[in-house]
Image: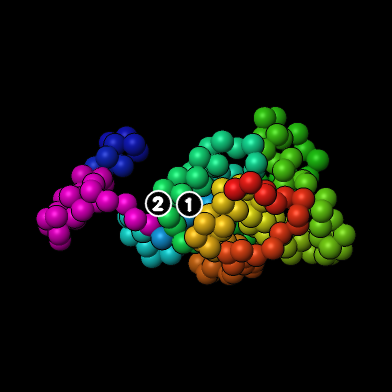
């Protein structure tokens, strides 16, 4: 059996098990989607949102990209955000990075990664903003992990700079924004940054016609 065929075999077994446990399970899943959370996470295969948070299908809306970035020109991310906030009415948006992130590590080097350069350039900007703090950390692993935290912080702030979030804050005073970091070595999530709804932001990023 090929490796991909194992996935299909597992899927059949999983679906059969769900129907045995609850014959109406898939009917309920097909009829409604009311997640309370939007998860913006890293594409890293070791950080599956549902498993590490104990959430079930239908409870968490997920978007993933390299290094859990919120980039103002990323139409994929912005479409997910718009749908989650204004149509699904999520109450919380979580940006979750992870310690030892390869995308952040790559951005802290001068290596040429081809097309990847264009993406991680945004992480280099985070490094530039916090360069004095980060570069004064003597230990390489600690330096990387601090950059992971700071990157999460900046991505949460990028969320607050979008017209999508500002419009939702004005209309419904939701969602709350959260910055978390997952530990690959212990399986624990550490909150590192929070922005409650209506948190003031720099007037440079505020929209006045929402």
Numbered mark located on residue 88 in the image: 2
Q: Which of 199 and 118 is in front in this view?
A: 199
Do the CB atoms of the residues marked 1 and 2 lie less than 8 Å apart?
Answer: yes
Quadrant location, the N terminus: top left
Check if residue 75 falls in the magenta segment.
Answer: no
- The answer to whether any part of residue 44 appears in the image is no
Residue at the image point whose x is 61% and y is 63% from the top: 198
- The answer to whether any part of residue 124 appears in the image is yes
- Horizontal and vertical percent position of residue 185: 56, 65
Count residues near mark 2 (Cα–Cα under 10 Å), then give few for <14, some for 14-19, many for 20+.
some
Residue at the image point whose x is 49% and y is 60% from the top: 172
66 up-or-down from 183: above or below: above
In-image side of 103 versus 22 (left or right):
right
Check if residue 32 falls in the magenta segment.
Answer: yes
**Dominant secondary structure of the residues highlighted in magenta in the image:** helix
170 up-or-down from 108: above or below: below
- Horizontal and vertical percent position of residue 32: 27, 51
- Quadrant of res 51: bottom left
Residue at the image point whose x is 21% and y is 44% from the top: 12
- Quadrant of res 141: bottom right
Q: Nearer the viewer, residue 11 or 133?
A: 133
- Horizontal and vertical percent position of residue 23: 12, 55
SS assignment at label 1: helix
Q: Distance between the residues labelled 1 and 2?
A: 6 Å
- The mark total stands at 2
Numbered mark located on residue 177 in the image: none
Magenta span of residues: 10-35
What residue did someone put label 1 on?
A: 85
In-image side of 26 versus 142 (left or right):
left
SS assignment at label 2: loop
């Amino acid at each position: 059996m090929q490796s991909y065929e194992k996935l299909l075999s597992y899927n059949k077994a999983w679906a059969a098990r769900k129907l045995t446990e609850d014959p109406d399970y898939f009917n309920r899943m097909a009829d409604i989607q009311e997640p309370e959370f939007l998860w913006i996470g890293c594409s890293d295969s070791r950080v599956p949102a549902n498993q590490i948070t104990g959430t079930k299908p239908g409870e968490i809306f997920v978007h993933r990209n390299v290094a859990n970035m919120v980039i103002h020109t990323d139409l994929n991310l912005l479409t997910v955000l718009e749908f989650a906030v204004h149509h699904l009415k999520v109450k919380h948006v979580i940006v979750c990075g992870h310690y030892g992130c390869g995308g952040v590590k790559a951005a802290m080097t001068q290596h040429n990664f081809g097309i990847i350069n264009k993406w991680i350039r945004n992480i280099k900007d985070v490094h530039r903003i916090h360069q004095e703090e980060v570069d004064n950390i003597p230990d390489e692993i600690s330096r990387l992990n601090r950059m992971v935290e700071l990157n999460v912080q900046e991505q949460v702030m990028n969320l607050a700079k979008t017209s999508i979030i500002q419009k939702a804050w004005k209309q419904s005073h939701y969602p709350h924004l959260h910055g978390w970091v997952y530990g690959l070595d212990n399986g624990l999530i550490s909150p590192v940054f929070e922005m409650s709804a209506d948190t003031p932001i720099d007037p440079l990023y505020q929209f006045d016609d929402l």
